[in-house]
Amino acid sequence: MASERISPLILDGLSKYLSIASHRFIEYAIFAFVELNLADRLVNAVPDQGLTVQEIMSDERSSWNADLLYRVLRSCADGGIVERINDDKHFVLSQSGRMLTSDHPSHARDFLRWILGPLNSNAGNQLPNLVCNEGTGSGFTRFTDGLDLYTFLCRSDQSDLMTIFNGAMTTVSAVTGTKLVINSDFGRFATLVDIGGSSGIYLAQILEHYPSIEQGIVFELPGVINQVKNGEEFKLRNIPESRYKFVAGDMFDSSTIPQGDAYVLKTFLHCFDNEKVIAILSSIRKANQNRIGQSLVSLFIVEYIIFPDRAMSNWQSHAFDIAMAYAFEGACERTQQEYEQLLETTGFKLKKLYPIQAPHSIIEAVLIN
């Protein structure tokens, strides 16, 4: 068939798809950069001199592919994490590239290794099969020996991946933390429990901003606690050890949940279907059964809430909704009304919505009789 003239509108559409492909290819280069830990090799380069590929390879000169490494770095320059100087054969880290060193407090390297890494990528590629109900389990369980993500990460042979995952979660909290700390008054509570708090970065940010809080508790799975119990995030903020502690347990087992004046549930309820969310909220209620009617127990749900009328943050909420869809069976982002129904089912009442859209927002609820 003779080729037909392609309209400018179609050409514009094709250009957008080509741009999507080009960005994907640069992602591969950035993944190679962080996986090979190239930022650590570049961090001490003299700013106006940089390092050549041969200097970057150092002891690996005989085994690495110098030409391919140069091409990776060239694409990383297009991605803004390195800069080419002088003769274009010398490289230095950009300001954002310096965040990708292995010891940077942002844990940005961990975040990219998790998001761009094989487990998350393979799980995401299962989305068409999930839509068609082909196969069993979530996108993750198809690559984790049938185990849910958290059980898989807690295996002794996955300790490195657990470290990467915890670092990635720290990055997410670091990006959104300030707005989520100052826009809700946590200072009115004496004891604050961060359920599923990972490294405790969000709780550490709260304790730093509200010195009136006497005790902060990070409640996590034993495997996670073993990775983060050194309290790095608290020490970075000079928070005394007397003001925080780590408690290991299971959010589905009320007997292991410590009592507190308020509970923070940040970006993990979206990992579960409604039945499991009800089980978690019910566990928190049961853990405080003896306090019902005697003292006020508050709950703060921090999530990517889907707002009506095409709210500014909805595109990110929709994006993470897709991530939840392939990551966990029945997992999703929810609207305010959907959270309100779950709260009422488990004996909580919505008190206030904080539409921060950072992109997270906060729902405050209280335990009722």
Image: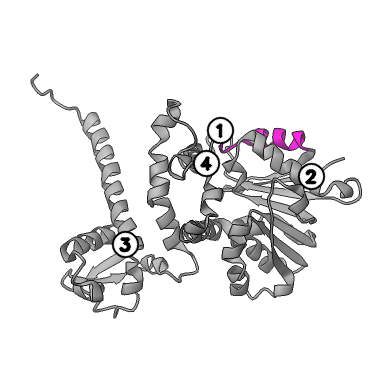
User: Badge 3 is on which residue?
Assistant: 33
How many numbered marks are there? 4
Tell me the residue at 24%/60% (across/down).
72
Place of residue 293 in the rendered image (x, y in percent of width and height, measured from the top left)? 91, 46
Name the mark on residue 317: 4
Q: Nearer the viewer, residue 211 or 6?
A: 211
Q: From the image, state whether disc 4 or disc 1 is nearer to you.
A: 4
Q: Residue at x 59, y 62 (%)?
A: 199
- 102 in the magenta segment: no
For the point 72% across and 63% down, which residue is it? 216
| Cα gap from disc 3 to disc 1, whole angstroms | 40 Å
User: Badges 4 and 2: C-beta atoms under 8 Å apart?
Assistant: no
56 is higher (above) or lower (below) than 30: below
Cα distance between the residues tagged 3 and 2: 46 Å
> Viewer-nearest of labels 4 and 3?
3
Amino acid on which the number 3 mark rests in the picture: Phe
Q: Which secondary structure lies at badge 4?
A: helix
Circle 1 packing at 10 Å, graded few (<14), some (14-19), many (20+), is few
Name the residue beneath numbered marker 2.
Answer: 285
Where residue 34 sits in the image (x, y, percent)? 35, 62
Q: What is the span of residues highlighted in magenta in the rendered image? A: 330-346
Q: Secondary structure at mark 3?
A: helix
